[in-house]
Image (spheres, rainbow, N blue to C red):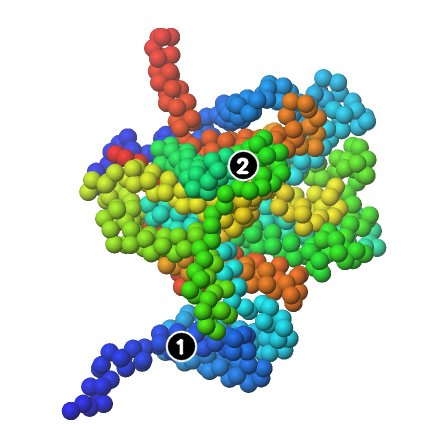
Amino acid sequence: MSTVDPKSSVPETPEEAAASGTLAASIALKQRAGGIVVPVLTALIAFLLGGLVVLATGHNPLLAYRDIFNGAGLNWIFHPTTNVANTAAYNLSQTLLQTTTLILCGLAVAFAFRCGMFNIGGQGQYFVGLYVANWVGYDFAHMNPLPHILLAVGAATLAGAAWAGIAGFLKATVGAHEVISTIMLNWIAIWVGEWLFGDGGPLQNSANATVPISNDVADSAKLPVFWGQQELQGLHIGFFVALAALVVFWVVLNRTTLGYEVRAVGFNPDAAAYGGISVKKNLIRAMAISGAFAGLAGGLDMLGYLYHFGQSDIPVSSVGFLGIAVALLGRNTAIGTGLGALLFGALLFGTTHGLSSNVIQPELAGNLTYMIQGLIVLFVGADVLILYLWNTRRKLRPQAKAETA
Amino acid sequence: MSSWAERLENPVSARLRDPATSGYAGLVLGALAAFLSIPPIMTRSVTWPILVGIVAAMLGIWTVTRGRRRLGLGAIVTGLVGLGLGVLATHSGTGNLNAVFDATLIAQMFASATPLTFGAIGGMFSERSGVVNIGLEGMMLMGAFWGVWGADKGGNWVVGLLVGMGTGAVLALVYAYFAIHLRADQIVGGTAVNFLALGITGYFFFQLYHGNYVSQGVSTIPNVHLGFLSHGHFGRHFLGPAIGNLNLMIWVSFLLVIASYVVVFKTPIGLRIRACGEHPRAADTVGINVYAVRYGAVILSGMLAAIGGVYLSDGFGGGTFNDNMTAGRGFIALAAMIFGNWRPAGAFGAALLFGFSSALALKLQVYSPSASTLFNVLPYVLTLIAVAGVIGRTVPPAADGKPYRKQ
């Protein structure tokens, strides 16, 4: 690039940023370019296409979406009540239970994104947190509730951080691509779980040696439930922990030196290094913090409502992967991730356990969630929609000025 | 008249003096140490595995002292692991040993390796052209469901194969459009493809089959019976059970490896694909249509991954499907491609290694079902070690994952 083209020297449009800049830089530009319009449009298009599939297979998409809306308990806002005997209230409490997990899994992806890395290993970090919480929750019985809960949650968080830290360490020291290493770590975590809970495994049920399910955590490790009953998967206080995590995420990124360094490395590692920021340290740190969010999600799930986990639960769980869609739809911001988690939490519960419909079966609707998730991720990753909006806004602006003048 | 000095100059002895020779000899001996105590040789004394293992480790040490550190360390580790496994095996009952290490282990290795081979070769084409393909898993899953659907509705496995390939190609085309024309982030796009395939196959599996098994009597991909191999003692006990009755797609996968090597490294098309993956701007300058090449390579990768899926459901699975049937095989295929350093033979070797490890995991259940489960992490751990650069560095194509923008 010896001849400097004044237009292309400064990456002004997302198009140029995507061509020249880093992942974080291009995402930041998209954020400015599209604002809230693009994520909403993206979700609407995904729902529309999903609806077309529903229509093509002989179901009424409008009625199906209405039933999913009710299944998620979102109709609760028309008749607010805290009594979980009411179906809408119960469904909403379950949706918020899923939202709790998805907020943290979304933050796990979002934090790494801000440092220019794609943490695709949220699922593995979540599992590791889950396993450790189960172990501490069961094996350290006879403790007082508060220290027991803190110990179990803390251990789960650290385990998630360590698991992701491996990927960060490999990236920082030998340059191994974090996507490849986190995928591998996911599958290692999955098979380790199959081993842990399988017959004869270390965490397998001690009372019944032929059932591939873990022991229940001790009562002292169970999180207090504030909405609903503990026996009926009530909403536990982990919900507030997740909301607090959103605040912590925002404060750490925007108001601390650590966050500044992480974002600087994400925007441009070379410039950050020139400015005296250690790129390696921040890659490891960002990845570990990412993993801590996912590990925390696993710990809260285990102590909050799962209490035990089995071999057959492992392939069914996909919250770590949903976190990718949550973070991308939320543009890797705290508020966006919170809203994205609510949307996917509602979809997750509303299409499966909460759904009672004569239009669409839960088996179909559950897969509809995967499709919508895939479409959202597909569109969010593309520049085209954002570019289109950016360009039309740019074209409109001078025209508007000319008209007012 | 030949002096000592002259003899040392000749290539054969020069090769023998090369530290690489002692390193590779150490690796082979390390494997031999374990091999000695399993059938068919099955020595029952601990002397042989210990002796051979120690020699292998010493060769490794010698290699390290002469400068080939990684190779030497590899030989030391192989020697010690071989020694340990060999001694362990001599303590195990002969009945169990015979149950684990019979010729069907080889047949099972090929059976588990084949979907990985198709996926890995497919991924290699895509990445050689500069497009990262995380979506192999999804494309394989599409092939698995729609392939068995095609075989069911079309009444013939050939139809199933074509339908499977077609759906894999369509999904790859969607991905290619986003990755190439819209310049979407390729990792994000590939992840989306996996979700999409999971949703589509699960949705239609329930819609068309109510989540039950595909109806009985689906036309399946046939096995190739090679009766002439089963003659004589060796043929009856080894060749026949090992390769005498393999699925047709296993043989096709062998041909694919050879064909893809020729195409990628010996033809102008292969040169163009590699040019687009290494330096798309230069390729564009000399008149190669980068977009067209990348589209072609990505669609080809979708078709190949889908064949792997069809094999899984309509060959290996005997005409069945279940939700998320591929269960991560697309990711192991991706790992095999990386482990094989983006080369057909390397990817094939890695697929065989990973296939062997999963076949062995099944067989080792006679010892401990619990521990054999843990054996399944081997492919992922090995790949993690490989990308960490402990055993030689893996080098992706230079422009892999970077969208190209025409000027």
Res. A61 image quadrant: top right
Measure the alpha-carbon separation of dots 2 and 1: 48 Å
- Residue B310 place in picture, x, y as percent: 48, 44
- Label annotation for residue B25: 1
Amino acid tagged 2 = Thr
Tag 1 subunit: B
Q: In the image, is residue A364 above or below residue B366?
A: above
Between residue A213 and residue A261, name the one nearer to us.
A213
- Does residue B359 show up? yes
Quadrant where the image shows the N terminus of chain B: bottom left
- Residue B236 place in picture, x, y as percent: 49, 69
Q: Secondary structure at mark 2?
A: helix
Amino acid tagged 1 = Ala
Residue at image coords 48%, 76%? B32
- Using a 10 Å C-alpha cutoff, classify the residue at mark 2 as few (fewer than 14 neighbours), some (14 to 19) or many (20 or more): many
Q: Secondary structure at mark 1?
A: helix
Between residue A314 and residue B286, name the one nearer to us.
A314
- Does residue A335 show up? no
- Residue B102 place in picture, x, y as percent: 54, 68
First in residue order: circle 2 vs circle 1: 1
